[in-house]
Amino acid sequence: MMIRVLIVVVLLVLFTLWAGTFKKAYEKGTVVPSRFQLMGEISLNFVRNSIAREQLGERDGDRFLPLLTTIFFTVLGMNITGIIPALNIAGTSVIGLPLVLALAAYVTFIYAGIKKHGMHFFTASLFPAGVPPAFYILVTPIEFLSTFILRPVTLALRLMMNMIAGHLLLVLCFSATWFFFTSTQVEGLMRAFGAGTFLFGFAFTLFEILVAFLQAYVFTLLTTVYIQLALADEH
Amino acid sequence: MDVNNIAALSGNLAVIGYGLAAVGPGIGVGLVVSKTIESIARQPELAARLQVTMWLGIAFTEALALIGLATPFIFA
């Protein structure tokens, strides 16, 4: 999809410019940041401080920060195209991209677990401590399903379905507006419904901006939590 | 008069199915948020941490509704 290529280019340019601004400010020792620099600092600090470091702590948070930042800004950029006029479809509303991002998260949390605990990571997550041995017949398949299958599937599905549902809602509202305003079947005062559906469409567009940010946040947060669970010591 | 046929239904039954499937997650998300509001009212200083947990809870609960939405694409 051309939109994805476009967004990747936009993100690359944006981050190159930010890197240049940060470097210049650092070398000059500027005290007051420019607006553009402040924008970059706020958004990058948001991922670092309120997602990575808050959940993983300073050391592990900084270790996984590159991946988390990439995921956050890719998802955000691809989501926001859903409400940009003339683009009008989210890059994440087709399974490919969410699947790739979910696989990246999946590989990372398994890698984090193996790096920290070795093969013990699998036994610890499949055979949780403190369960009577007989219950492992029941618990182990459930744990396997929820940890190693449902986690990546729900990560990808949650993102994609949110974007599809949002897109469908907008299409519904605006095509209803088009129908009420232009169709010859509609008579008299019924046309006024068009204004109502248009207002709804506008409200849902604002709602979609919120959803775009929220889904980027949730996707990154869940990746962080999965990494944190993989790193956690047994109790 | 034909009395065997009291009610008839046409259209796609899956729509009703998804409506039912959305009830559970709807109640679930409502519970998550209401309990978070209660907790914040009791301990406002924990608001930031409770909100993160709330978003996690919503994300897990919401997944059920979204699986329902994805089902026709998978099994149709």
Image (tube, coloured by chain):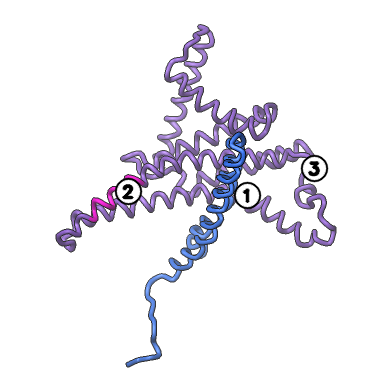
Chain colours: A purple, B blue
- Which dot marks residue A52? none
Asked whether the viewer can see residue A148, the reply is yes
On-image quarter of the N terminus of chain A: top left
Real-space Cα separation, disc 3 to disc 1, in angstroms: 20 Å
Nearer to the camera, A157 or A94: A157
Q: Is B10 above or below relative to A124?
A: below
Q: Is B67 above or below relative to A124?
A: below
Foreground disc of the pair 1, 2: 2
Tell me, yes or no, whether the highlighted magenta stretch contains residue A125. no
| Same subunit: marks 1 and 2 | yes
Q: Secondary structure at mark 2?
A: helix
Q: Say which residue appears at 42% left-offset and 30% top-offset.
A: A10
| Kind of residue at disc 3 | Glu
Instruction: Indicate left or right for A35 with A180 as reference.
Output: right
Foreground disc of the pair 3, 1: 3
Identify the mark nearer the N-term, 1 or 2: 1
On-image quarter of the C terminus of chain A: top right
| Kind of residue at disc 2 | Gly
Q: Percent x, y for residue A63? A: 66, 29
Nearer to the camera, A18 or A185: A185
- Pointer 3 residue: A234
Asked whether the viewer can see residue A104, the reply is no
Q: Looking at the rendering, which quadrant does residue A108 occupy?
A: top right
- Pointer 1 residue: A151
Stretch in magenta: A193-203
Nearer to the camera, B46 or A121: B46
Q: Percent x, y for residue A14? A: 44, 25
Q: Say which residue appears at 44% left-offset and 41% top-offset.
A: A210
| Kind of residue at disc 1 | Arg
- Pointer 2 residue: A201
